[in-house]
């Protein structure tokens, strides 16, 4: 699988892709790759330089304010760093620290073997304290998904799952771009980053994450005061 992912990564870069999520990728003169926050492109001299792949894990852990980032695809990656890696193998490893599992999912999707799970099915299989999440109403789903998954402040993944087995849209309150892998989630109007739109490798969401399930539970329990 790593080889297939690296082949896909190389192909994407050769086709002009130069960013993923909030990360800009460029080739170095020595044949390696340099990564930085997209908002930091052009300001390399002021960035904290690193050449260790494992530093990606540290960079990805906290936001600019030092808060832990439970959702690695949230648009709150910290700025001020530049990471150089020697080859595509190290690039894959670094990107997997920033966006865990996303390249394996992308590769499966490109090979037409990615299975997606409807939200209702994900909620129905919960147990213990999260079992109650399955009681969420359709109206509540509209609000919870729109609020939690939105690209401008929520999550940069492109949603591939449906609401239920009938194929309903996850939330009519999200724009159609949220479900389009060709759309750069970090730059469409209303998103946080100031970077210009460029060809982006998509971050795909094949099923609701645990954090969204927790939000659904909160809605059922009446704990979502801002919805
Ligand atoms: S369900 Fe998917 S799109 Fe929504 S917040 Fe979780 S990972 Fe992001």
Image (spheres, rainbow, N blue to C red):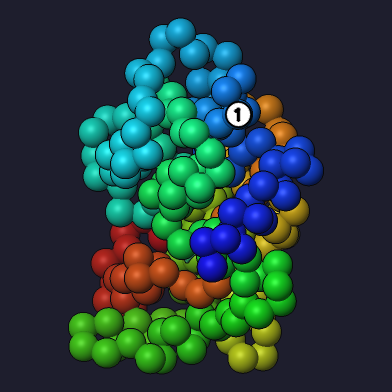
Q: Choose between 106 and 175: the one closer to the eye.
A: 106
Q: How many marks?
A: 1
Quarter occupied by residue 79: top left
Extreme residue in the top direction: 45
Pick the quarter of the image with the C terminus.
bottom left
Q: Give above or below for 86 relative to 185.
A: above
Q: Which residue shows up at 58% across the image and 14% down it?
A: 42
Evaluate whether residue 16 shows in this view.
Answer: yes
Q: Choose between 22 and 100: the one closer to the eye.
A: 100
Q: Position of residue 93 (x, y in %)?
A: 44, 49
Q: Which residue shows up at 46% across the image and 8% down it?
A: 45
Extreme residue in the right direction: 15
Evaluate whether residue 194 shows in this view.
Answer: no
The secondary element bearing badge 1 is classed as loop
| Residue bearing the label numbered 1 | 31
Q: Which residue shows up at 65% across the image and 55% down it?
A: 7
Q: Residues within 10 Å of mark 1 (few under 14, many from 20)?
A: few
Pick the quarter of the image with the N terminus.
bottom right
């Amino acid at each position: 699988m790593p080889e297939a992912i690296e082949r896909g990564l190389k192909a994407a870069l050769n086709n002009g892709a130069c960013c993923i999520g909030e990360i800009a990728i460029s080739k170095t003169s020595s044949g390696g790759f340099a990564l930085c926050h997209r908002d930091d492109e052009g300001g390399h001299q002021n960035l904290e330089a690193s050449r260790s792949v494992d530093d990606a894990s540290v960079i990805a852990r906290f936001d600019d304010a030092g808060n832990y980032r439970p959702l690695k695809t949230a648009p709150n990656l910290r700025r001020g760093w530049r990471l150089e890696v020697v080859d595509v193998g190290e690039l894959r490893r670094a990107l997997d620290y920033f966006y865990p599992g996303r390249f394996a999912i992308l590769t499966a999707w490109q090979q037409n073997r990615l299975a997606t799970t409807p939200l209702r099915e994900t909620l129905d299989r919960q147990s213990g304290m999260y079992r109650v999440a399955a009681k969420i109403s359709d109206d509540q789903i509209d609000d919870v998904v729109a609020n939690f998954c939105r690209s401008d402040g929520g999550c940069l993944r492109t949603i591939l799952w449906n609401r239920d087995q009938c194929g309903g849209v996850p939330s009519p309150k999200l724009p159609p771009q949220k479900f389009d892998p060709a759309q750069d989630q970090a730059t469409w109007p209303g998103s946080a980053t100031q970077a210009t739109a460029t060809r982006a490798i998509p971050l795909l969401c094949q099923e609701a994450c645990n954090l969204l399930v927790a939000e659904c539970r909160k809605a059922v329990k009446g704990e979502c005061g801002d919805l």
